[in-house]
Structures are given as C-alpha cells and as structure tokens.
Image: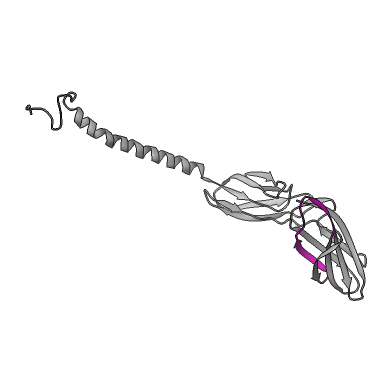
C-alpha cells in the first residue's frame, strides 16, 4: 500500500480527508433526528395545553364558563373547547323554564373532564285537592331516554302511591305522594305519559302530558 494513504482508502477513494467526514455524517444525522423529535414533542405539548369539559342532560341548554359557552345538542351532549387547565373553573347550565345548575371543575391538560347536569323545571304545584302536578317532562317537550319524571300529588288524605303509565300501560310505581324517577321508553316516538295517584281512601286522580323521546 502506498505511503501516506488513509487507512481503508482505495485507488477509487476521493481526495484525502473525505472518509473522516463520511464517518461523521451519521452522527450529525442522528443529532438532527433528535432535534426533530424534540420539536414534535414540544408541538404536541402545545396542542394539549387546553382541556375539555363535556356532557349534559337536556337538549337546548346553554352551558357556559367565564371564557365561553355552548348549547347542548339533540342528545343532551356538549363540549366547551379551549378551557384552561386548572382548578376552580365554574361551569353553569341553564334553560328557560328550568332552574339553573352550576358545578366547579378541575381540568387537566390533555384530558376530558365530564360534568353531568340535571336541570329541574320551575314548577308550581297545583294546590287543589285531588290533583297531580307533573313537573317533568313538560307538556309537548322533547326529552332524552330514560325520561326523567318529577311529579307531586295534592290530597287532603294520605297518598298511598303514584303510578306511571306510558301509552295506557303501567310502567312504574312508587310509594307516597311524590315521584322523582327515570323511566325507560322507546325513542323516536311521542308518548302519552300519565302520573296517577291512589290515596288511602281509594281515590284515583291523575295528570297526563305528551312528550317526544329521543
């Protein structure tokens, strides 16, 4: 081998010193790959530095916090986007004709915080004797399944129990003169919902509303 030629070089090798630079290039490429991964990771972290709050019960309710608001869809679901991560975030849900509700959320970057709201109607109980007042569902409303049924009987005699009848069939019964329960019904249908009271003197009285179940 001629003197002065680098180790590993041949007659076809380029000029002197190229081999050393060729060995160094993979190290440089690896360093560049590392930088690219680091940049991707930082971009990912920036994307997830906000949190999301999700879910409610009624269609058309407004859910809000200090930085924005949204409306629940036909399934009662909602999403508040770009909510800052942190503790003590006050979230409220409201709908005309219903008592508002609020909760305090603690959100985490990159995670979904679920808040479920159940809005109760502003309801005036009929004070006449032998009457039933259905507070929920309201007449001719659109509701979600299972259907939230709230009602109360007014009677000078003790009410033995209340019954829930759906389209002429008895589906549920509870002791006493008030009801706050969820009853499953078929969806995509307008149902006839009756709450019927039976007191200890065998009086039977009721109220009926119609509601479309989604």
What residue span does the magenta drawing correspond to? Answer: 176-193
- Judging depth in this view, the residue of 124 and 151 nearest the camera is 151
Residue 199 x, y percent position in the rendering: 89, 73
| Magenta residues, dominant SS class | strand
Q: Residue at x 82, y 72 (%)?
A: 176
Vertical arrangement, residue 21 with respect to residue 97, above or below? above
Q: Residue at x 31, y 35 (%)?
A: 29
Q: Residue at x 52, y 48 (%)?
A: 110
Left of 106 or right of it: where is 121? right
Quadrant of the frame with the N terminus? top left
Is residue 169 inside the magenta stretch?
A: no
- Figure label count: 0
Left of 28 or right of it: where is 96? right
- Judging depth in this view, the residue of 85 and 196 nearest the camera is 196
Residue 119 x, y percent position in the rendering: 74, 55
Q: In which quarter of the view is residue 168 placed?
A: bottom right
Residue 109 x, y percent position in the rendering: 52, 49
Q: Residue at x 24, y 34 (%)?
A: 24
Vertical arrangement, residue 144 with respect to residue 23, above or below? below
Vertical arrangement, residue 183 with respect to residue 26, above or below? below
Residue 195 x, y percent position in the rendering: 85, 63
- Judging depth in this view, the residue of 207 and 23 nearest the camera is 23
Left of 39 or right of it: where is 190? right
């Amino acid at each position: 081998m001629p003197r002065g030629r680098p180790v590993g070089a041949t007659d076809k090798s380029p000029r002197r010193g190229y081999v050393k630079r060729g060995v160094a290039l993979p190290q440089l490429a690896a360093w560049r790959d590392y930088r690219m991964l680091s940049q991707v990771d930082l971009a990912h972290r920036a994307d997830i530095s906000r949190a999301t709050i999700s879910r409610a019960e009624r269609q058309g309710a407004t859910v809000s916090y200090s930085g924005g608001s949204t409306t629940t869809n036909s399934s009662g679901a909602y999403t508040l986007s770009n909510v800052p991560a942190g503790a003590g975030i006050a979230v409220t849900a409201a709908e005309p004709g219903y008592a508002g509700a609020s909760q305090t959320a603690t959100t985490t970057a990159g995670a979904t915080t679920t808040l479920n709201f159940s809005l109760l109607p502003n309801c005036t109980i009929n004070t006449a004797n032998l009457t039933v007042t259905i507070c929920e569902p309201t007449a001719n409303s659109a509701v979600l399944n299972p259907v939230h049924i709230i009602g109360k009987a007014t009677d000078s005699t003790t009410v033995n129990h209340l019954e829930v009848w759906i389209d002429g069939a008895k589906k549920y019964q509870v002791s006493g003169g008030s009801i706050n329960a969820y009853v499953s019904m078929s969806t995509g249908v307008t149902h006839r919902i009756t709450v019927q009271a039976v007191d200890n003197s065998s009086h039977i009285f009721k109220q009926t509303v119609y509601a479309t179940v989604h």
